[in-house]
Image (tube, rainbow, N blue to C red):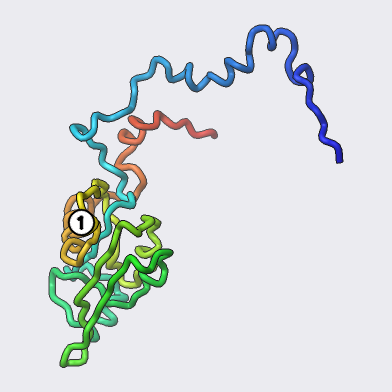
Amino acid sequence: MAIKKVDRKAFLNIIETVLFVDFIKGLSVTLKNLLRRPITTNYPVEKLTPPKRYRGAHGHFVWDGTEPDSLRAIEKFMSFEKGKSRCVACYMCQTACPMPTLFRIEAVQMPDGTKKVVRFDMNLLNCLFCGLCVDACPVGCLTMTDLYELAGYSRRSAVLKMDKLEENAIDWKKRRGNEPDRIWIDDEHRERLWGKIEWSG
């Protein structure tokens, strides 16, 4: 099958060619934003609050009376403390993760036969921040917070241990727990960044 050669004259008339109409159409976005105020922020002095569903540093929700029914059903099989992680060491997060080596999860059996999670480490150097571990968690323990400043001076600082995971989730829930679960905090915040959206009727 032969390739059909398209001549420039086939889709541009003489006026469009002389007046560079196709060139101006190509620059329309640039021309439209030429006189608009820039939307950059003066970081780190000014920081934007990410959406509630932002995929930042991970956190562990704790036993605080807001557990889902799935967790209350296995409560008698777990040894837990109020205010501590609600992880049940089911390894579903590790199974769902594309990089399962980033998890170090350990649990022990207590003398009364219940199970207690003693270690839950996450190495964020291997993390893709895809959120599959959060979706896989059957008891709503694992979450992703809005913390995005994760730079450190050593590899050790990129490993989140259980106490840090608990701290992240407690802080996130305190600050943003009552917000509606939406992409942007409010329409004003979204419009400031992206402009007003006109929906077609």
Three-letter code, disc 1: Ser
Above or below 35: residue 107: below
Q: Is residue 118 left or right of residue 144?
A: left
How many numbered marks does the figure carry?
A: 1
> Residue 36, how many percent across, how many down?
38, 19
Q: Determine which residue is flagged by label 1.
A: 157
Residue at the extreme right: 1
Asked where in the image residue 172 lies, by quadrant, the reply is bottom left
Residue 58: give x, y in percent of width and height.
Answer: 27, 58
Q: Is residue 18 left or right of residue 82?
A: right
- Residue 42, compared with residue 56, is above or below; it is above
Viewport quadrant of the N terminus = top right
Q: Residue furthest front?
A: 154
Residue furthest to the left in view is 82
Residue at point 16% right, 65% down? 163
Nearer to the camera, 128 or 191: 128
Helix, strand or loop at mark 1: helix
Q: Which residue is drawn at 36% across and 70% down?
A: 94
Which residue occupies 21% across, 92% down? Answer: 113
Compare residues 176 and 36 and report the one nearer the observer: 36
Q: Is residue 71 above or below residue 56?
A: below
